[in-house]
Amino acid sequence: MKKKFVIAALAFSSIATLSSFNESSEGSSEKRPMFGSEVTGHGPCYYTGEVQADGTGVTAMEVETTTYVFWIGFPSTSTVYNQCKP
């Protein structure tokens, strides 16, 4: 029982230490999330040349997102349709 308690205490303290760790080089106080994703940038909005059923043009925009898994960021780029007005 004593070993389990010590292991649990070490695990909790290591998670608490990692959650307070910040790798920012600018010195900002913003911390990385442990899990989740956030939009980090987007490109210009443009017409694709296609037409919807109601006669309006289809718009597209490139969106860059960063997905975090245990504070490690994985950037990705995707195209979002009909979410903007050029």
Image: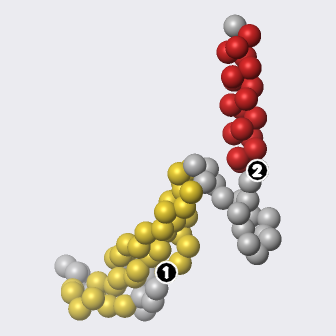
Could you say where residue 53 lies in the image, as x and y percent from the top left? 19, 79
Q: Is residue 10 left or right of residue 77?
A: right
What residue is disc 1 on? 42
Tell me the quadrant of the picture where the C terminus can be found.
bottom left
Q: Residues within 10 Å of mark 1 (few under 14, many from 20)?
A: some
Callout 2 amino acid: Ser
Please give the label number shown on residue 20: 2
Lateral position of residue 75 relative to residue 57, left or right: right
Q: Position of residue 57 (x, y in %)?
A: 28, 88
The image shows residue 56, relative to residue 35, as above or below, that is below
Q: Nearer the viewer, residue 45 or 52?
A: 45
Mark 2, residues whose alpha carbon is within 10 Å: few (<14), some, or many (≥20)? few
Which of the numbered marks, if any, corresponds to residue 66?
Answer: none
Q: Is residue 46 left or right of residue 51?
A: right
User: The N terminus is located in which quarter?
Assistant: top right
> What residue do we see at 76% from left, 50% from top?
20
Residue name at image x 72 percent, y 38 percent: 14
Label 2 residue SS: loop
Of residues 43 and 56, the one nearer the viewer is 43
